[in-house]
Image (cartoon, rainbow, N blue to C red):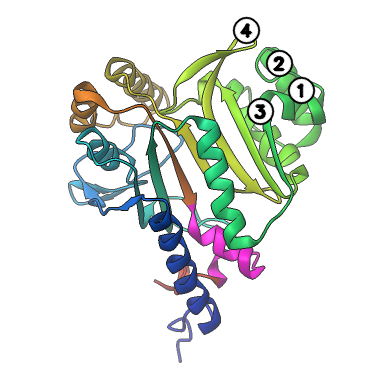
């Protein structure tokens, strides 16, 4: 008899998921944030070379509801949140599933500090109070590796990464070495709730870039709990011209890597032209949050059916 028909998660985990969803909705209801739904099957997808979207016929399953939610913001929705499925190809393992549950929300007139505080408040409401620390990406590298990630030569970052990680790759881009150091050396040292902000400009994605201590940095943050990344937030870029330029740079990087370019979402760009309000937004992985709450080391234990059973 084939046994993989059985659920991945226990009945207790399914009940805990239902309770978590109710808690999330109550959290935002009390704060006056509107729940919305947007399509997951769309004509356009992200251009980010670090994300591999899933195609369905001539359309794309969304890696996040960000583009559609920004169109709602530009139309005057005010603060909004969404709980939905998101899809990313090639992401499978104890902390990844190609289909996962995402909580994403946007706060007009919030700065990054206000959004970091709200994200940490939500996580604390679910997991209970834990020690909380906020520090910059630069300070994190200086504290544990005694190197400045914003100014150090790429060859120094590569040498340091190779000293810590058994990595067989050839010469790589600067961000590859930074990512290796972050994931293999720094993240395991983070305890409690850690809010890391002000990333290198090259990692801005859809975030505003501003000067900090003489260096341009991306106004974005990531929230970790005991070294597990849970959330990624931005002070959102509202400049349509700059956004188009970033999309085009992404496509150039895709083509350089031998991948086809991806069509630009002209509806999003039109919404930015019409006027996206100044806002901050964040996406949080609910499956990971539930796994932390239940003390599970694998997402499969909190998903009704993980990728191997579908």
Q: Which mark is residue 137?
A: 3
Mark in front: 3 vs 1: 3
Is 107 placed above or below 302 here?
above
Q: Disc 2 and disc 3: Cα gap in Å?
A: 19 Å
Q: Disc 4 and disc 2: Cα gap in Å?
A: 22 Å
In the orientation shown, which residue stands out farthest toward the bottom?
Answer: 1
Mark in front: 1 vs 4: 4
Q: Disc 1 and disc 2: Cα gap in Å?
A: 6 Å
Q: Disc 4 and disc 3: Cα gap in Å?
A: 15 Å
Which residues, given as a range, are shown in magenta? Answer: 285-301
Residue 227 lies left or right of residue 97; in this view the side is: right
Q: Disc 3 and disc 1: Cα gap in Å?
A: 19 Å
Q: Which residue is mark 1?
A: 159
SS for tag 3?
helix
Neighbour tally class for label 1: few under 14, some 14-19, many 20 plus, Cα within 10 Å: few
Is 301 placed above or below 241 here?
below
Q: Which residue is mark 2?
A: 155
């Amino acid at each position: 008899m084939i046994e993989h028909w059985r659920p991945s998660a226990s009945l207790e985990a399914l009940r805990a998921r239902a309770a978590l969803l109710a808690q999330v909705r109550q959290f935002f209801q009390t704060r006056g944030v509107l729940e919305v739904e947007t399509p997951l099957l769309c004509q356009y997808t992200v251009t980010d070379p670090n994300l591999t979207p899933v195609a369905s016929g001539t359309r794309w399953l969304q890696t996040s509801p960000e583009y559609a939610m920004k169109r709602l913001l530009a139309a005057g929705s005010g603060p909004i949140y969404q709980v939905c499925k998101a899809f990313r190809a090639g992401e499978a393992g104890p902390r990844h599933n190609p289909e996962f549950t995402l909580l994403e929300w946007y706060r007009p007139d919030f700065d990054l500090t206000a959004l970091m505080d709200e994200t940490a408040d939500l996580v604390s409401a679910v997991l209970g109070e834990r020690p909380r620390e906020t520090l910059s990406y630069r300070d994190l590298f200086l504290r544990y590796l005694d190197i400045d990630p914003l100014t150090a030569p790429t060859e120094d970052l590569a040498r340091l990464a190779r000293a810590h990680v058994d990595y067989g790759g050839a010469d790589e881009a600067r961000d590859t070495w930074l990512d290796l150091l972050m994931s293999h050396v720094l993240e395991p040292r983070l305890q409690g709730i850690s809010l890391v902000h002000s990333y290198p400009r090259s990692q801005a994605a859809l975030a505003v870039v501003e000067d900090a201590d003489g260096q341009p940095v991306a106004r974005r943050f990531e929230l970790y709990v005991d070294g597990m990344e849970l959330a990624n937030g931005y002070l959102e870029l509202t400049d349509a011209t700059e956004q188009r330029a970033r999309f085009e740079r992404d496509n150039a990087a895709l083509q350089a890597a031998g991948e086809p370019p991806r069509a630009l979402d002209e509806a999003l760009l039109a919404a930015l032209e019409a006027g996206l309000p100044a806002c901050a937004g964040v996406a949080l992985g609910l499956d990971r949050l539930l796994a932390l709450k239940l003390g599970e080391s694998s997402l499969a234990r909190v998903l009704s059916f993980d990728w191997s059973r579908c």
